[in-house]
Image (tube, rainbow, N blue to C red):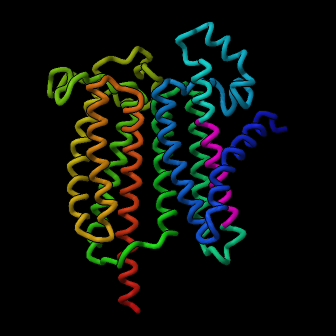
Amino acid sequence: MVPSHFLQLAAIGLCVAVLPLSWVWVRGNQAKFRKLLWVSTFLTLDLVMFGSFTRLTDSGLGCPDWPGCYGTASPFIAHAEIRAAETAMPTGPVTMAKAWIEMLHRYFAMALGVLIITQLLLVIFRRRTLRIPIVWPLGLLMLICVQGAFGAWTVTLKLQPAIVTIHLLLGVILLGALGWFAASQTPLPGRPEPQTRPYFAAATLGLVLLFVQIALGGWVSTNYAVLACADFPLCNGQWVPPMDFHQGFHLWRSLGKTSGGEMITADALVAIHWTHRVFAIVTVVYLAWLGLRLRRFDSLRRPASLLLILLIVQFLTGLSNIVLQWPLLNAVAHNGGAALMLLTLVMLDYRILSSRRQAAAMTGA
């Protein structure tokens, strides 16, 4: 028998999803499915940013069980248990504010699941008009289910860095996949430009570099290594400070511990931060070159310009994290900027590929 709080949680997720679904429904009769895809993409971006807010406010264990909160569907119902835990440990992981932050993150995740299930149902029951392969919404549904499983393990394994980082990366992959799916249902602006064809591999490489950089950033965040280097451009007064790469990048270990169970050293945290900082230079230089090259094409000018703007914002927010000692909103903006950059690169890749296909089709005709 399904526990009652599971049904209550499902009902809450459905209620949250009603708002974006209603917006899609009332926005005219044309291209409702496309609008649903873009709304889902926007919600995923918000969810990635809210996930970073949850992590940065130490709210990941605000409710120490999953999917509910002390076996209930809401911190309102678990008020007594949360207050008891907060009284026993005032600076601990469980407070009423942290519980609400954690549960709101879960509610939004469930709402996104409802939107993706809606996509799947529409593709099934309107297959003659939509003519969309079922593999897209089905794959997205499987992806968000895996994402939910890692969300559960994030709690049950007490914020183990490897699990939390994978949870972040799955969210970013989901964002990119939804963005590509939405772009595939959106008419391309302007005429096809087959001369962009040689840049598909370059744009894909940029996407790979950014994904690796996001993974390194997630590893910095989940290990709380943002302030391991207290200055810039030097790291603790040195270009190459003492570092412990073995323990810093030993993946399967508890939060704040080495693989042997001891407290993780400052040198290990410096190794994590320093690697992220150095690889950022490689990523920024390459993406700046790519953006400048792609701005020459009319069909790619706007996303390429956006990429360059986001690069500048990312540099400034990353630098501010160090200089201003990791202010919360700035750190969330840094995470959100990385997600936006990835989505922008997905759009560039899609436009290059589609422009090539359109040009080939016109030539064949």
Q: Position of residue 220 (x, y in %)?
A: 36, 31
158 and 346: which is toward the camera: 346
- Corner quadrant of residue 314: top left
Find the residue positioned furthest to the right: 1
Number of marks: 0
Query: At x 47% / y 40%, what residue is drawn?
Result: 49
Query: At x 66% / y 50%, what residue is drawn?
Result: 19
Q: Position of residue 23 (x, y in %)?
A: 63, 56
Tell whether position 41 is magenta. Answer: no
User: Does residue 271 lie above or below 187 as drawn?
Assistant: above
Is 69 positioned to the left or the right of 268 in the image? right
Find the residue positioned furthest to the bottom: 365
Which quadrant would the N terminus be assigned to in this image?
top right
295 and 209: which is toward the camera: 295
Q: Position of residue 92 (x, y in %)?
A: 54, 14
Is 40 positioned to the left or the right of 68 in the image? left
Query: At x 56% / y 38%, what residue is drawn?
Result: 150
Q: Position of residue 15 (x, y in %)?
A: 71, 45
Is 36 positioned to the left or the right of 251 in the image? right
User: Does residue 105 lie above or below 116 as drawn?
Assistant: above
- Point out the stretch of residues depicted in magenta: 105-122
193 and 276: which is toward the camera: 193
Query: At x 58% / y 56%, what residue is drawn?
Result: 140
User: Does residue 131 lie above or below 171 as drawn?
Assistant: below
61 and 150: which is toward the camera: 61
- Corner quadrant of residue 225: top left
